[in-house]
Image (cartoon, helix red, strand yellow):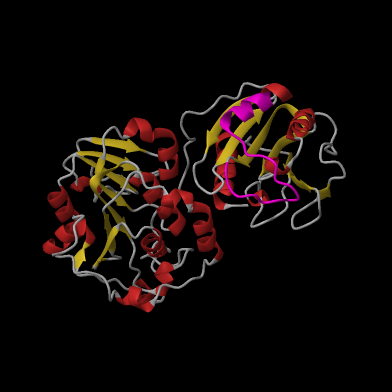
């Protein structure tokens, strides 16, 4: 299973999943780089079916087109990365419709692209019209279908219901989040801070230099950096605690992933000139934020990323153990430098945890999307990777003087 598949199944569950599920059946769900079982933790019964035994498999099927359940006995059927390997997939759709209870749900993910991978065969790729055709064939109702452009599989995701009145959602469900405050670590050395200038002062200089017409910020929290904008601003945060609010602000109280899925086309009506990413402090989240945001940036635009210079290895842990926490955001610039040598990257030695300034943006570049799954898998498979000493020591970070800031935001190389 690839990372974007797990993310899409989580979307299906959080957007459409019932409050409680007695029986969830995963067809073709042998654990290969992960299992959906991990996200269906509230199910009373989770059964994994496959053609061969293996990790997480509960039932081995004798007949791939016959499910060992009575009529109308299953609450949710799920399947990912199976349909392309099912030679007569339409027969299986009919069987799924048989075992689903009235108003029960079927979540499916299948590739629309990608290399041949036989388990034991690889017969098909699927496009959006295919799911409506299968709904018509099986008698199920297609509630929602979306096409994920992240490579190499570019998954097609479908939410089906057996009868019922479930409707396609236009916006995500609201979510609750824990308070931001975390007590300092008992080891005072782990809470070290450094930097030649406070990041807010540096961001203020950037606003003056760039003079944006549209500013966007991910992770606004109390709004202190957002308040620096004198132009139209877009703020995105699932749990904002605004103390200061710009006069011309469009506020979206949702995750950045949901913003780019549901709202972005209506929200961003002109190119973004300056953006600040200070959202979830994990490399894969920053990867998605940058990837999604660059598509809407002006050619002369600038993206600034916070928390790229941890002051202690513990601050860089993926699981938060310090008040001053960067997570593994530091890993994303390394990935970006490797995948996108066309970009201009400048690390600034700001307090408390450094800034990365990215210019020479290209809204038409799809490298990050095309490479998403293999790159994110590598990140997730090495969660304990430590930041190099030169990162902690900031040996390559630039002093955040006004002249250096001007050079950083300019697409041109220094003279």
44 vs 305: above or below: above
**The C terminus appears in which quarter of the rendering?**
bottom left
Residue 171 image point, x, y percent: 46, 31
158 displayed left or right of 22:
left
Residue 185 can be seen in this image:
no
Residue 287 can be seen in this image:
yes
Q: Is residue 114 magenta?
A: yes
Magenta region: which residues? 113-135
42 vs 188: above or below: above
336 displayed left or right of 193:
right
Residue 162 image point, x, y percent: 70, 25
Residue closer to the observer: 163 or 244: 163
Report which quarter residue 136 is drawn in.
top right
Q: Residue at x 37, y 32 (%)?
A: 265
Report which quarter residue 90 is drawn in.
top right
Report which quarter residue 83 is drawn in.
top right
Residue at the extreme right of the image, as rendered:
62
The rendered magenta stretch, by its main secondary structure, is classed as: loop
Residue closer to the observer: 206 or 367: 367
189 vs 343: above or below: below
Q: Is residue 251 magenta?
A: no
Residue 132 image point, x, y percent: 62, 25
């Amino acid at each position: 299973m690839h990372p974007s598949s797990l993310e899409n199944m989580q979307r299906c569950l959080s957007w459409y999943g019932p409050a409680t599920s007695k029986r969830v059946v995963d067809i073709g769900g042998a654990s290969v780089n992960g299992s959906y079982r991990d996200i269906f933790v509230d199910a009373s019964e989770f059964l994994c079916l496959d053609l061969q035994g293996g990790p997480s498999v509960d039932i081995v099927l004798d007949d791939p087109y016959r499910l060992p359940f009575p009529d109308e006995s299953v609450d949710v059927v799920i399947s990912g990365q199976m349909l392309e390997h099912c030679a007569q997939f339409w027969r299986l759709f009919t069987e799924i419709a048989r075992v689903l209870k009235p108003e029960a749900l079927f979540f499916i993910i299948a590739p629309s692209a990608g290399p041949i991978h036989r388990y034991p065969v690889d017969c098909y790729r699927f496009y959006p019209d295919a799911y409506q055709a299968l709904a018509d064939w099986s008698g199920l109702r297609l509630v929602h279908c979306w096409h994920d452009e992240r490579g190499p599989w570019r998954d097609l995701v479908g939410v089906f219901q057996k009868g019922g009145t479930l409707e396609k959602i236009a916006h995500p469900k609201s979510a609750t989040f824990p308070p931001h405050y975390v007590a300092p670590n008992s080891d005072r050395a782990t809470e070290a801070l450094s930097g030649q200038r406070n990041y807010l002062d540096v961001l203020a200089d950037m606003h003056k230099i760039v003079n944006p017409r549209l500013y966007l910020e991910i992770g606004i929290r109390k709004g202190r950096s957002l308040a620096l904008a004198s132009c139209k601003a877009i703020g995105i945060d699932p749990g904002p605690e605004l103390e200061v609010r710009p006069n011309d602000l469009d506020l979206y109280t949702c995750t950045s992933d949901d913003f780019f899925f549901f709202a972005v086309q209506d929200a961003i009506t002109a190119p973004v000139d300056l953006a600040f990413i200070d959202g979830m402090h994990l490399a894969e989240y920053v990867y998605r934020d940058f990837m999604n945001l660059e598509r809407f940036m002006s050619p002369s635009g600038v993206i600034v990323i916070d928390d790229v210079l941890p002051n202690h290895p513990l601050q860089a842990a993926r699981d938060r153990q310090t008040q001053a926490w960067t997570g593994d955001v530091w890993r994303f610039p390394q990935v970006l430098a490797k995948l996108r040598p066309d970009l201009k990257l400048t690390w600034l030695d700001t307090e408390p945890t450094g800034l990365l300034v990215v210019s020479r943006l290209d809204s038409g570049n799809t490298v990050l999307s095309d490479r998403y799954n293999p790159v994110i898998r590598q990140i997730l498979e090495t969660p304990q990777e430590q930041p190099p000493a030169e990162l902690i020591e900031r040996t390559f970070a630039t002093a955040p003087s006004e002249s250096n800031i001007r050079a950083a935001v300019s697409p041109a190389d220094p003279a």
